[in-house]
Image (cartoon, rainbow, N blue to C red):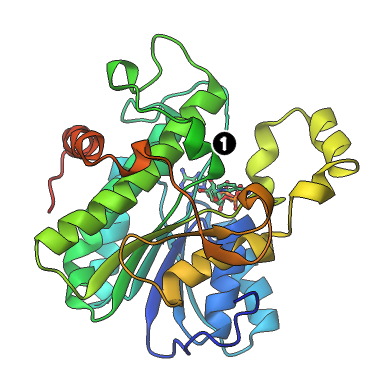
Amino acid sequence: MDNLNNLPNQAGRIIIVTGANSGLGYETALALAKKGAKMIMACRSSSKATIAKEKIQQQVPNADLEVMEIDLSSLQSVRKFAKAFQAKYKTLDVLINNAGVMAPPYSKTEDGFELQLGANYLGHFLLTGLLLEIIVKTPQSRVVTLSSLVHKNGVINFDDLQSETSYNAMKAYSQSKLACLMFSFELQRRLEKAGNLQTISTASHPGIADTELSRNMPKFIYYLAKYTVAPFFTHAPSEGAKPTILAAIGDAKGGDYFAPTGLREMKGKPGKATATELSKDSDTAKRLWDVSEKLVDFKYL
Ligand SMILES: NC(=O)c1ccc[n+]([C@@H]2O[C@H](COP(=O)([O-])OP(=O)(O)OC[C@H]3O[C@@H](n4cnc5c(N)ncnc54)[C@H](OP(=O)(O)O)[C@@H]3O)[C@@H](O)[C@H]2O)c1
């Protein structure tokens, strides 16, 4: 499946992509709009999202696109988004938890969370919970969550979840992406346990794609790599989006995890990904879920 032509038409289906204005989210929204889905571009900047929407419309003139504002680093904003969506729509076919930041200088969200844990994971944890009632009522629905190769370096540091004692930007990013993958697997287990068999949870990672995600990397390192070694282990965002598209509308079952299948899953044809034992550990996932419910003050499943 390295071209998307054989995937089913999505006319009549509603799909939310968070962070749809840039990189992988943009490519995912473009590809799914081409398939005929109504795309909700859930972005924190309406102006950036409107530019992205116009870019998609130029390529897909009949695309059905709607921009809705959400800041995943603000629980209040996540609640506001969910309320606005529920007021307008009664079904949701696919929620794609894509938005993310990597390795910023240490900062806290307005809710007091380390930014990466807050925006990459906790914001999506709450968003999924708030929209789940609609999702589980929609036949053949899915929740897709973006992880990363670096989940393999991640641990969930329950003693210092918000990196308050010490902050290592990549460690905190890895923790957030491990949390995303654990969440995806745990969500599937809980859906099954609750008997919600028409909804599945899947996950994906893009390998290494040249996007805005590297914005916090020193520029000279970025450009040095870009024009020397990077072409050997990175691919275009349109390629990096393919595992997510497969997880969203391809042949998948609950708990599946997709990635590029080339050398060390850095690039290549999309297919099944490898996940660490820790990411599949249900005791740790349950503990993380319980802590997350308390942090976002919302319980589900
Ligand atoms: N690129 C890779 O190689 C790679 C590898 C592994 C995993 N990933 C994952 O892929 C996902 C997409 O990343 P990307 O590579 O496409 O990076 P990107 O080009 O930087 O896109 C990230 C998107 O997330 C949005 N975002 C960031 N913080 C947000 C917040 N608080 N609220 C709402 N939206 C927010 C950004 O919005 P703004 O434009 O407004 O900042 C942007 O739309 C991330 O989850 C990332 O962890 C990427």
Extreme top residue here?
Answer: 165
| Residue drawn at x 13%, y 51% as measured from the top left | 300
| Residue drawn at x 22%, y 41% as measured from the top left | 282
- 274 above or below 256? above
Label 1, ligand 1: CB separation under 8 Å: yes
Q: In the rendering, at what x and y percent does residue 81 appear?
A: 32, 57
Q: State which quadrant residue 95 falls in.
A: bottom left
Q: In the rendering, at what x and y percent does residue 120 appear?
A: 43, 42
Q: State which quadrant residue 21 falls in.
A: bottom right
Is residue 22 in sight in this rendering?
Answer: no
Position of residue 20 in the picture relative to residue 85 (left or right): right
Q: In the rendering, at what x and y percent does residue 36 appear?
A: 50, 87
- Nearer to the camera, 207 or 15: 207
**Image quadrant in which the N terminus is located:** bottom right
Q: Quickly name the residue at label 1.
A: 102
- Nearer to the camera, 127 or 290: 290
Asked which secondary structure carries label 1, the reply is loop
- Crowding at label 1, few (<14), some or many (≥20) Cα neighbours within 10 Å? many
How many discs mark residues in the rendered view? 1
